Image: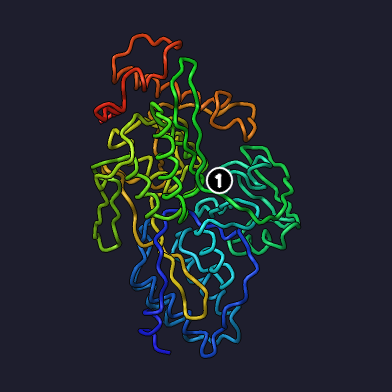
Amino acid sequence: MKIRKLLKRKFIILFATTFSGLFLNNFAEATVLNNSYKEVIDHVWQIVYRDFLDSSGKFQKSNWINLRKDVLSKTYSDSNEAYDAIRDMLSKLDDSYTRFLEPKEFNQMRIDTSGELTGVGIQIVKDKESDDLIIISPIEGTPAFDAGIKARDKILSINEISTEGMNIEEAVKLIRGQRGTKVKLEILRGSKSFFKILSREKIEIKSVSSKVNQTKNGLLIGYVRIKQFNANASQETRDAIKDLETKKVAGYVLDLRSNPGGLLESSIDISRHFINKGVIVSTVSKDGLKETKRGNGQALTKKPLVVLVNEGSASASEIVSGAIKDNKRGKLVGKKTFGKGLVQSMRTLVDGSGLTVTVAKYLTPNGTDINKSGIIPDIEVKMNINPILQKEIGTRKDKQYRAGEKELVNIIKRNYQISEFNPNTTNLNALLKINKENKVFSLN
């Protein structure tokens, strides 16, 4: 099969996330190559040569061309040898997010983005400088989250096997397994190491949860928590906002803490739910081509907004946070975000395997590149010293939420010059006749 035919057979999804491949399902193996294993190797080479965005400044096309001659001059007796050659080739890019995925892993990634997960519930990246396997964030409601795993924890060993020199794919093979079985992780947090034994489970995760919270002074606050930016997140967020609007909330707390990211389009759509006009994000390709996404004039609410972020808020979460901050649409409360400003494209290869390749970087509306630096919140607040229960997240027992709610009330008071509110009256929305003449709370 000629390479130009291979390049036509590609499945592309743009991601603003980190890829772990830790979520496993039992899918049939994709058809193995019937012809030369070199075809899939060359397919990968061509994609990188054409589309790869080098964020490190170390990529040299001349070296990449010479590498092609070397890898195609060798003989590969099976897919494992070809896959190892691909991984070795990609390791020279110095990019943690450009990764090769075997057919099962690739199939699972596509399932993951649809909102169905299987595994322990963590996403990881390999730090090129320290060579550590670092946890981006545990996903809420998963075994890892319930066990107290935190963003930026380092994995020292998996089932007593050291992760020193181990790549992500090797880690995946050790962590994944049959549902109901267990995996033992050695975790380094700061200067202390400890073990966690996690059960492998099929995890049904709803991306968005919401509720109405009432302040001490009787204000109704719409609380929306987004756990992942998968294919369902935008519609679920839309439904949550519409429901909360009928309950006449005075403002919103959007919780993006420990959200590792997801689909780029999902983050843009969700930003548009809150931002009526203005730039949301710009993506810049390796050739310097810039594409800018803006609000579409169809925001679902203009009411005051506070966004909660932390060290585990990454990628797509940072797109939304950056858009809200730079547009002065709301305030960010919490801790500095993870700092991933790169976009990946997911490509299907000829044998059913896949490649996630960094194809662009993104800039916040003010033109800021947040990669490796993150976004500093307007109000920095540490999380509770003593861990809180999952059911206490988004309540007054949650220190960061409490600070966010306080700031939201201050915004409401400043906007409407309210010096005093009598809690014995009806909710502030009714007092100010929010619905009359469509006078909603606005930060714009």
As displayed, is residue 381 above or below residue 169? Answer: above
Residue at image position (72%, 42%) is 194
Image quadrant of residue 330? top left
As displayed, is residue 305 above or below residue 364? Answer: above
Q: Dividing the image into 4 quarters, which one contains the N terminus? A: bottom left
Which residue is identified by label 1? 137
As displayed, is residue 425 above or below residue 292? Answer: above
For the question of whether residue 334 can be seen, the reply is yes
Asked whether, in this view, residue 157 is left or right of residue 44, the answer is right
Q: Amino acid at mark 1?
A: Ser
SS for tag 1? strand
Residue at image position (37%, 31%) is 305
The number of numbered badges drawn on the structure is: 1
Along the viewing direction, whichever of 430 and 102 lies nearer the viewer: 430
On the image, the x and y values in percent for residue 273 come to 34, 43
On the image, the x and y values in percent for residue 57 come to 35, 58
Q: Dividing the image into 4 quarters, which one contains the C terminus? A: top left
For the question of whether residue 160 can be seen, the reply is no
Along the viewing direction, whichever of 431 and 292 lies nearer the viewer: 431
On the image, the x and y values in percent for residue 424 come to 45, 10
Question: Few, some or many C-alpha atoms within 10 Å of disc 1 (few <14, some 14-19, many ≥20)?
Answer: many
Residue at image position (29%, 33%) is 328
On the image, the x and y values in percent for residue 415 come to 29, 20
Q: Residue furthest front?
A: 436
Colouring method of the image? rainbow
As displayed, is residue 216 above or below residue 126? Answer: above
